[in-house]
Image (tube, grey):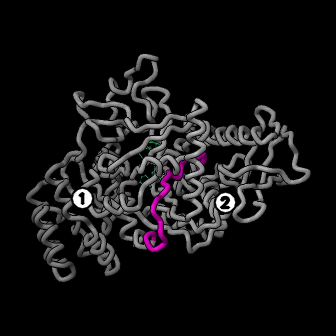
């Protein structure tokens, strides 16, 4: 587009919008030469004008300005000279008797902490499940291998089981986005909050970031009256919590620690007592569960230390040479793969929320549909836009202390990512079945190889007992259901659901 024409039309629109938008807003638009956002103003209905002016008023104009001036990812690029080492405060999965004993004691400390009720759970569920090829929130995806229960169901029922076992109220924070909020809320209502008390469930929306035309730097519009906005990444969490008044709520409830996880991993052990105990023992502000990376190109973030600070290198940013380094045993030298399972001290997240500049923005080139100067919706064939998001793990580098704790993927990591192949629903269901079979076998049940099993209504740390008549040999698909013997009891009785 010819820049003289752009300028003229910008002025025209600014004049027509003059009486309806604040002087400060018009000033921002003009100063940053973004007048095209008002290109269709004259033909918009009153409602549409209100919508657009609200979006513009909400926009972080300092952010728009920094985009215009920096036009590049804000995060430090990893230089080949950087001194990258494995995380130094790291606890491996227990193998020796002494290590197992230490974990056992940590778990006891974790249970005491749980009992005191100072913990909340937060699940990030704002991402769009584009790779799964569905337009529904990922949390609604049916994943129970026998029951067909959703990811949200399997996760929320752990929170329910924990609150019953420890007789505590656990605030359950579900971060959604503009794209997933309404459907998520409806799903929770429809499913009767999965048995949780709605007063303990907080659905709140993460923020958005505008998309820019990658050649002109102009804000893109998704309709004549709407900016093209995308979720601001899970790094939006502390800011969204602050906007929703959640820090005050948590403080009021005496919450000190948050168990954080992603909506895509049904194997997560929510509030794993050993993890909590180790976090407390090491007085960590942040703890991270990692799995051993299997191959250099596995699509997991890598937890490392760079010049003494803990950092996560996202798989897309990992230099090939670094990812492939081997140690003396032939294992990957840097192998702490990010599971997206963390513990955060509340005060740490509050600190991040009060320093927005502490989390850098990452940019990515994407195809973003937009309306052109004539108001026609264009579906670009190649990447046309710069999208911005923040990652929660960028906060690790400013934590006073970060602890890395190993877990095993067969125990706790089977994320649902793709429609087919790796990390597909089929793979995740198989992982649930395998983990359940292991658990049942260690409780004395014989599960014949390849038989589908699933357990409902039980937390990972619960002790399993059996109702009279519950079969101990399983050679056909079986869905077990747990009933707690009494509130506050660690024992759950299983029966096979007919
Ligand atoms: C993510 C991690 C990666 C880790 C892997 C483990 C990032 C950038 N990378 O990869 O280091 O090894 O998971 O499974 O997170 N989400 C939001 N709002 C957003 C974006 C994402 O709530 O704006 C949520 C998603 O709903 C999901 C989680 O964050 O629960 C992870 O996002 P996803 O895009 O699936 O990350 P991956 O690239 O798979």
Determine if the magenta segment contains residue 497: no
**Considering only vertical position in the picture, is 35 above or below 472?**
below
Residue 285 horizontal side relative to residue 457, left or right: left
Q: Is residue 366 visible?
A: yes
Percent coordinates x, y for residue 234 in the rendering: 40, 54
Which residue is located at x 66 percent, y 42 percent?
432
- The image shows residue 109 at horizontal and vertical percentages of 56, 52
Mark 1 nearby-residue class (10 Å; few <14, some 14–19, many ≥20): many
Q: Nearer the viewer, residue 190 or 46?
A: 190
Does dot 2 land on a helix, a strand or a loop? helix
Number of residues whose C-alpha sits closer than 10 Å to that of mark 2, classed few (under 14), some (14–19) or many (20 or more): many
Which quarter of the figure has residue 185?
bottom right
- In this rendering, is residue 125 above or below 429? below
Residue 260 shown in magenta: yes
Q: Which residue is mark 2?
A: 161
Q: Which residue is mark 1?
A: 219
Which span is picked out in magenta? 250-270
Question: Decide: marks 1, 2 in contact (CB < 8 A)?
Answer: no
Q: How many numbered markers are drawn?
A: 2
Q: Earlier in the sequence, mark 1 or mark 2?
A: 2
């Amino acid at each position: 587009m010819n820049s003289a024409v752009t300028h003229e039309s910008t002025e025209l629109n600014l004049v027509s919008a003059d009486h309806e938008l604040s002087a400060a807003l018009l000033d921002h638009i003009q100063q940053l030469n973004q007048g095209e956002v008002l290109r269709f103003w004259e033909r918009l209905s009153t409602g549409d004008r209100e919508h657009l002016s609200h979006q513009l008023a909400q926009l972080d104009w300092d952010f728009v300005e920094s985009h215009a001036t920096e036009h590049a990812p804000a995060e430090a690029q990893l230089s080949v000279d950087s001194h990258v080492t494995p995380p130094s405060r790291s606890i491996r999965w227990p193998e020796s008797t002494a290590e197992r004993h230490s974990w056992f004691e940590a778990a006891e400390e974790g249970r005491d902490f749980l009992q005191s009720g100072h913990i909340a759970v937060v699940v990030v569920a704002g991402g769009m499940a584009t790779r799964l090829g569905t337009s529904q929130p990922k949390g609604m995806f049916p994943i129970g291998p026998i029951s067909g229960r959703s990811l949200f169901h399997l996760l929320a029922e752990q929170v329910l089981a924990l609150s019953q076992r420890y007789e505590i109220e656990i605030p359950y924070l579900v971060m959604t986005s503009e794209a997933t909020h309404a459907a998520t809320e409806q799903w929770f209502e429809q499913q009767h909050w999965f048995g949780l008390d709605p007063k303990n469930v907080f659905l709140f929306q993460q923020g958005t970031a505008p998309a820019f035309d990658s050649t002109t730097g102009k804000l893109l519009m998704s309709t004549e009256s709407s900016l093209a906005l995308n979720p601001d990444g899970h790094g939006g969490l502390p800011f969204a919590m602050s906007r929703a008044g959640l820090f005050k709520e948590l403080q009021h409830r005496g919450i000190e620690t948050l168990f954080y996880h992603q909506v895509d991993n049904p194997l997560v052990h929510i509030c794993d007592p050993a993890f909590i105990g180790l976090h407390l023992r090491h007085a960590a502000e942040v703890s991270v569960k990692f799995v051993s990376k299997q191959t250099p190109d596995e699509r997991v973030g890598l937890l490392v230390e760079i010049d003494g600070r803990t950092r996560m290198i996202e798989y897309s940013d990992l230099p090939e040479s670094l990812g492939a380094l081997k140690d003396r045993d032939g294992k990957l030298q840097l192998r702490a793969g990010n599971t997206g399972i963390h513990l955060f001290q509340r005060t740490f997240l509050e600190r991040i929320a009060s320093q927005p500049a502490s989390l850098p923005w990452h940019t990515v080139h994407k195809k973003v549909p937009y309306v052109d100067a004539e108001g026609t919706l264009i579906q670009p064939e190649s990447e046309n836009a710069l999208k911005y998001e923040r990652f929660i793990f960028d906060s690790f580098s400013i934590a006073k202390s970060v602890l890395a704790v190993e877990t095993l993927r067969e125990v706790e990591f089977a994320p649902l990512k793709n429609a087919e192949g790796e990390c597909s629903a089929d793979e995740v269901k198989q992982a649930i079945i395998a983990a359940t079979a292991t658990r049942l076998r260690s409780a004395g049940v014989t599960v014949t190889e390849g038989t589908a099993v699933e357990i409902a209504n039980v937390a990972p740390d619960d002790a399993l007992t059996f109702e009279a008549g519950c079969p101990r040999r399983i050679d056909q698909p079986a869905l077990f259901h747990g009933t707690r013997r009494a509130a506050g009891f660690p024992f759950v009785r299983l029966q096979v659901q007919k």
